[in-house]
Amino acid sequence: MVQWQEISGAVTAPRGYQAAGIVAGLKPSGAKDLALIYSEVDAIAAGVFTQTQVRAACVDYCRQQLQRKASARAILCNAGQANAATGEGGWEDVRESAQLLSQSLGIPGDAVLLASTGVIGQRIKMEALRQGVPKLVAELSETGGDEAAAAIITTDLVTKSIALEAQFGDRTVRMGGICKGSGMIHPNMATMLGFITCDAVVSSQLWQEMLSRAVDKSFNQITVDGDTSTNDTVIALANGQSRTPAILRDGPEAQKLEAMLTA
């Protein structure tokens, strides 16, 4: 029996999310290169990251943030420069990126998560980012999921997005996702970014466990050419705006939500 149906909207399909994707001048091609996913309220946040020893600054930043608190309001992703193998300067760029976005959105700095994709060894073009972030925030909309999907890709030939809807009792839960990755795919997510939004109410520990299992059953099963990457990141937000009863432990509702996440 089908437990859910596919709907449009990508990461803005769930309630309480907005997204945007713009041309900030980070890519030489002039394509969209800066994406934002924003939850209107605090969301439970979970993450799964590269298992390589050499990691981009944004990966270490997100891991530290999620260890401190399992919640967030925004995900900022730049394409063009990976900001990996960039030393202390790359770390300063990550900290400034989070500060720029928190100021533009009027949210705490620790409510921002970050991801980068692009050329390893290159720092983010910060002057372009400084000018781009306010424009990006101004473009936020409840229909911006497709623009965000377009702004995170690098060598991909197409954008990748999905959204699902299912009944939980008398309420509807929605989940949306966007992803990038083309070539350099091997077990353990290489060079891949994925961002998932959901409006269910779920405990932070359970949400993290669900995401880890879902990634193991999906992205960590794929092989193309044996390379791994410095930047692999999957972040999932759950903001509770469906107003469904809280899912706090394993059971039919938790299993259904995890099946949606894996799908």
Image (cartoon, grey):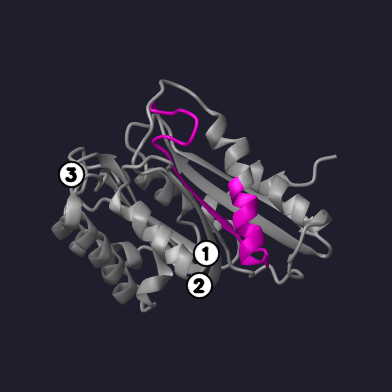
At horizontal 54% and vertical 35% (from top left) the residue drawn is: 220
Q: Is residue 263 left or right of residue 111?
A: right
| Quarter where residue 201 is shown | bottom right
Q: Is residue 7 visible?
A: no
Q: Of helix, strand and loop, which one carries label 2?
A: strand
Q: Amino acid at mark 2?
A: Glu
- Label 3 with label 2: CB-CB less than 8 Å: no
Packing grade of label 2 (10 A; few <14, some 14-19, many >=20) is: few
Gap between marks 3 and 2, in whole Å? 32 Å
Packing grade of label 3 (10 A; few <14, some 14-19, many >=20) is: some
Question: Which numbered tag is attached to residue 169?
Answer: none
- Label 2 with label 1: CB-CB less than 8 Å: yes
Name the residue beneath numbered marker 2: 40
At horizontal 55% and vertical 68% (from top left) the residue drawn is: 43
Name the residue beneath numbered marker 3: 122
Q: Of helix, strand and loop, which one carries label 3?
A: loop
Residue 174 point in image, percent of width and height: 66, 56
Name the residue beneath numbered marker 1: 17
- Label 1 with label 3: CB-CB less than 8 Å: no
Residue at the top extreme, as displayed: 225
Give the mark nearer the N terminus: 1 vs 3: 1
The one of 86 and 202 positioned closer to us in this rendering: 86
Residue interval drawn in magenta: 183-212
Residue 56 point in image, percent of width and height: 30, 48
The one of 58 and 245 positioned closer to us in this rendering: 58
Residue 200 point in image, percent of width and height: 67, 63
Residue at the front extreme, as displayed: 53
